[in-house]
Image (cartoon, grey):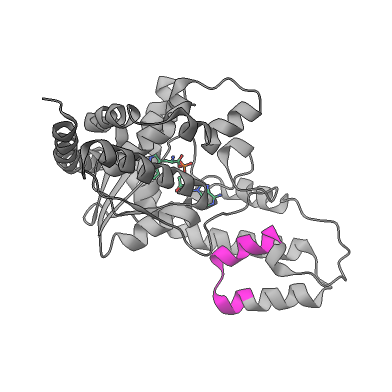
Amino acid sequence: MRVLSGIQPTGRPHWGNYFGAIRQYIDLQEANEGFYFIADLHALTTVREPDVLRENVLNAALDLLALGLDPAKANLFVQSEIPEVTELTWLLMTGTSMGLLERCHAYKEKKAKGLAADAGLFTYPVLMAADILAYDSQIVPVGVDQVQHIEVCRDLAGSFHHAFGETFVLPKAKTLDIGAKVPGTDGQKMSKSYNNTLPLFGDVKKIRKQIMRIVTDSRPMEDPKDPTDDHLFQLYQLFAAPAEVEAMAAKYRAGGFGYGEIKKAVAEVSEEYFAPARAKREELEADLDTVRDVLAEGAKRAREVAASVVERARRNCGLR
Ligand code: TYM
């Protein structure tokens, strides 16, 4: 199967990015043809400092490779190095209804907050559709917040087909049961824009402090609690083995234990879980040329595929 997904280089990746999406990339690279990219064009809608953007892109590549993306098995590249994708964005845009984009949540939320949205944010889902369609992608592993955008992609492909005949492969979103919507330190969805993230890399002591400050409810310690509606428990579940998760659930139900205990457990399991990736990242940092080579190779292969798909789209809609 052809698998594709992207991540925005808008800051350091967090637990939500890993458990919702990146973990899937790593699993799926074994038996599929993977195309994974760093969405720098999308990031331009928020990152407006060139040096920061450049640094973020390189950091995102280091992060993905450290977490286990293997360039011998999958292609890793930078979105903007495939100009065919921006060309395809225009081809799709000409058949996109304004109403469809008005219903997309990133734009809707920004508008609801009274913030000024630019045309880049408004048409963001069309660029994302082009990302997916340009590689004849069949499966798109993501967190639940991106599922709407993949539906939009299917709609846009459908409108194009209606006007110009069968052209694209229709993709399917793939989400996990556990991890599709990782909560942040305040219990809302973990998101860079809510300032509630727990990073994958960085100073361990600082992360531990952030974990200890996770917001909890104020029910008395002796009350039995339902583990399933507690975000600390949900975080613990991401890391611990099933038997440990069951033991923790039993403690919740029995009552008489404090949130401090599970916070400590979350800090310990998460530290241990990401330790190998931290070590790998340090190795890679000392060898940035190799990382740049990986991105160049990935872009070469991605471009071959995108060029042939976009050629098909150009032909079908009557461009020379
Ligand atoms: P981005 O950079 O916001 O997020 C990258 C991936 O992480 C997932 N994710 C989460 N999953 C579970 N729980 C959370 N709290 C959480 N927060 C983030 C996201 O669902 C995503 O899979 N528009 C995309 C980037 C993109 C893309 C694409 C993705 C551009 N083109 C084509 C797939 C296909 C984005 O902003 O992801």
Depth check: 257 or 191 in front?
A: 191
Looking at the image, residue 7 sits to the left or right of residue 130; the answer is: right
- Residue 281 spot, x, y in % from top left: 39, 48
Viewer-side residue, 37 vs 278: 37
The residue at 31%/35% (across/down) is 79
Task: Please identify the quarter of the rendering in which residue 224 is found.
Answer: bottom right
Residue 232 drawn in magenta: yes
Residue 23, position in %: x, y?
Answer: 42, 58
Question: Residue 196: x percent and y percent?
Answer: 64, 43
Q: Quadrant of residue 298?
A: top left
Q: Quadrant of the N terminus?
A: bottom left
Q: Which residue corresponds to the image point at 15% horizontal and 26% vertical from the top-left?
A: 319
Magenta span covers which residues? 230-245
Q: Is residue 286 above or below residue 110?
A: below
- Residue toward you, 188 or 306: 306
| In magenta segment, residue 240 | yes
